[in-house]
Image (tube, grey):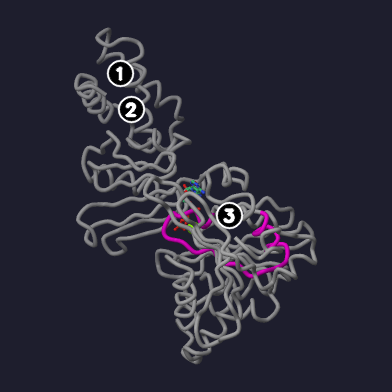
């Protein structure tokens, strides 16, 4: 938007502030748009061409009726994430690439009132007393807000809800994995191997989990437990539970741990835990060790071994009656397979490693690496999974595993 248009925008907004009633929310959007159009016409007259005038009108309308300056970013289906670092720095991620946009808020007060508006639609708020919040918007997008005094400026991070979740074919096209790994993982899911998907922030863990969930046989009952609802499995028999944050007066919180415990009473064939992040780790691990086979979850971690160590630590959280040795043993027995993911500098998400957790030594975490990435390729290490025979019983064969060579 050039300087002249920005100038008009400012004048129109000043006039609008005087003309629009304060109970804007109760007025039909079409009536508000009419008022904006009339004022735009009266100020711009013939000094802009039709397209410029329309652009100006749409931009002001979306600021007033929509989500302000970032409305266009929220509406753009190719944008997956928006990061607002104070009023003057807004980044957006498009096709995996993060770049600075030319969009600004006037000042941090305008940014905070945008935050209030968007959070109030989710029944949440952020104040100096509660200066950070996580919420889910009505369209399924996730928002995190941090505001002064714990940051110098308001910081808003939005993970947009993707109406189209990548399917396995698309993940193969994106070179996140190849068809050989895809069919191996599909066989593992069918054969009720307990799998964790490990990776750093935004490395594509949840997306892969969603895709693997679709391999669960259709006659099984799947219970999904999540902090914030993200998974949308293509499966006929799925029920989903979502945590509830405490209300403004601190009451009514429902934790992941409570939901995991409850899910065990729902006669699940499979439990899918969106992300293990706290003391619910013990409940999941115990469930896996007591017959709840074929569970799937993600964990935030940078390597296969780190993910096991993290699980062990999480298991100890809030469970003072178990020792570190027991936590390690339980973790080793529970987890069969780890899929390690990473987000590369160019925005691509890749499977870096697929490793089995070896069970013959319960006092140290050891792995049997099956596939590892070397540059663009993911290669077979020459070591087949110890449960290959189990997969074969169900019709899965892999010539590489048969020959047992690279
Ligand atoms: N294989 C992929 N290739 C390219 N983009 C992907 C891939 N998987 C996921 N994405 C995109 O990356 C973003 C993050 O994906 P996802 O939520 O699956 O990651 P995550 O590791 O679960 O993140 P978090 O750490 O926040 O839980 C999404 O916008 C998604 O569309
Ligand atoms: Mg995730």
Q: Is residue 278 magenta?
A: no
Question: Which residue is located at x 33 percent, y 27 percent?
Answer: 60
Is residue 246 visible in the rendered structure shown here? no
| 298 up-or-down from 153: above or below | below
Q: Nearer the viewer, residue 64 or 188?
A: 188
Instruction: Find the distance from the CA under tag 1 to the CA under tag 2.
Output: 9 Å
Tell me if mark 2 has few (under 14), some (14-19) or many (20+) residues whose alpha carbon lies within 10 angstroms of its own.
many
- Residue 205 at x, y = what percent? 51, 57
**Looking at the rendering, which quadrant does residue 264 occupy?**
bottom right
**Mark 3 nearby-residue class (10 Å; few <14, some 14–19, many ≥20):** many
Q: Which residues are magenta?
A: 183-206
Q: What residue is shown with label 1? A: 40
Q: Determine the residue positioned at 48% across, 49% down.
A: 376
Of residues 208 and 165, the one drawn nearer to the viewer in this rendering:
208
Q: Is residue 352 left or right of residue 239?
A: left
Residue 335, position in %: x, y? Answer: 59, 74
Whether pointer 1 and pointer 2 mark residues with C-beta atoms closer than 8 Å, the reply is yes
Mark 1 / mark 3, whichever is N-terminal: 1
């Amino acid at each position: 938007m050039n300087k002249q248009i920005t100038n008009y925008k400012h004048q129109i907004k000043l006039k609008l502030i005087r003309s629009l009633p304060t109970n804007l929310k109760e007025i039909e959007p079409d009536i508000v748009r009419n008022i904006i159009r009339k004022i735009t016409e009266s100020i711009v007259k013939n000094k802009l061409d039709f397209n410029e005038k329309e652009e100006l009108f749409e931009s002001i309308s979306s600021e007033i009726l929509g989500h302000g300056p970032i409305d266009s970013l929220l509406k753009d289906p190719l944008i997956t994430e928006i990061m607002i670092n104070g009023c003057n720095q807004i980044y957006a991620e498009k096709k995996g690439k993060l770049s600075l946009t030319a969009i600004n808020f006037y000042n941090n007060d305008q940014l905070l009132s945008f935050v209030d508006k968007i959070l109030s639609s989710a029944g949440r708020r952020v104040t100096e007393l509660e200066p950070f919040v996580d919420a889910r918007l009505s369209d399924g997008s996730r928002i995190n807000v941090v505001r002064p005094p714990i940051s110098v400026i308001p910081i808003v991070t939005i993970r947009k809800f993707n109406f189209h979740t990548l399917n396995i074919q698309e993940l193969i096209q994106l070179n996140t994995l190849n068809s050989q790994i895809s069919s191996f993982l599909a066989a593992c899911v069918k054969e009720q191997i307990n799998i964790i998907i490990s990776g750093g922030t935004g490395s594509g863990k949840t997306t892969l989990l969603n895709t693997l969930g679709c391999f669960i046989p259709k006659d099984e009952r799947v219970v999904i437990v999540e902090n914030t609802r993200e998974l949308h499995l293509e499966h006929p028999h799925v029920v989903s539970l979502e945590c509830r944050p405490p209300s403004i007066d601190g009451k009514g919180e429902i934790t992941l741990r409570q939901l995991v415990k409850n899910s065990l009473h729902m006669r699940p064939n499979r439990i899918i835990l969106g992300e293990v992040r706290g003391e619910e780790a013990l409940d999941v691990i115990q469930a896996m060790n007591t017959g709840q086979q074929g569970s799937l979850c993600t964990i935030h971690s940078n390597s296969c071994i780190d993910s096991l160590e993290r699980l062990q630590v999480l298991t100890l959280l809030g469970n003072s009656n178990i020792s570190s040795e027991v936590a390690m043993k339980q973790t080793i027995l529970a987890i069969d397979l780890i899929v390690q993911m990473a987000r590369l500098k160019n925005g691509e998400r890749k499977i870096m490693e697929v490793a089995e957790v070896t069970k013959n030594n319960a006092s140290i975490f050891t792995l049997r690496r099956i596939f590892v990435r070397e540059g663009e390729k993911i290669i077979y290490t020459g070591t087949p999974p110890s449960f290959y025979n189990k997969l074969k019983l169900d019709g899965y064969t892999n010539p590489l595993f048969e020959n047992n060579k690279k």
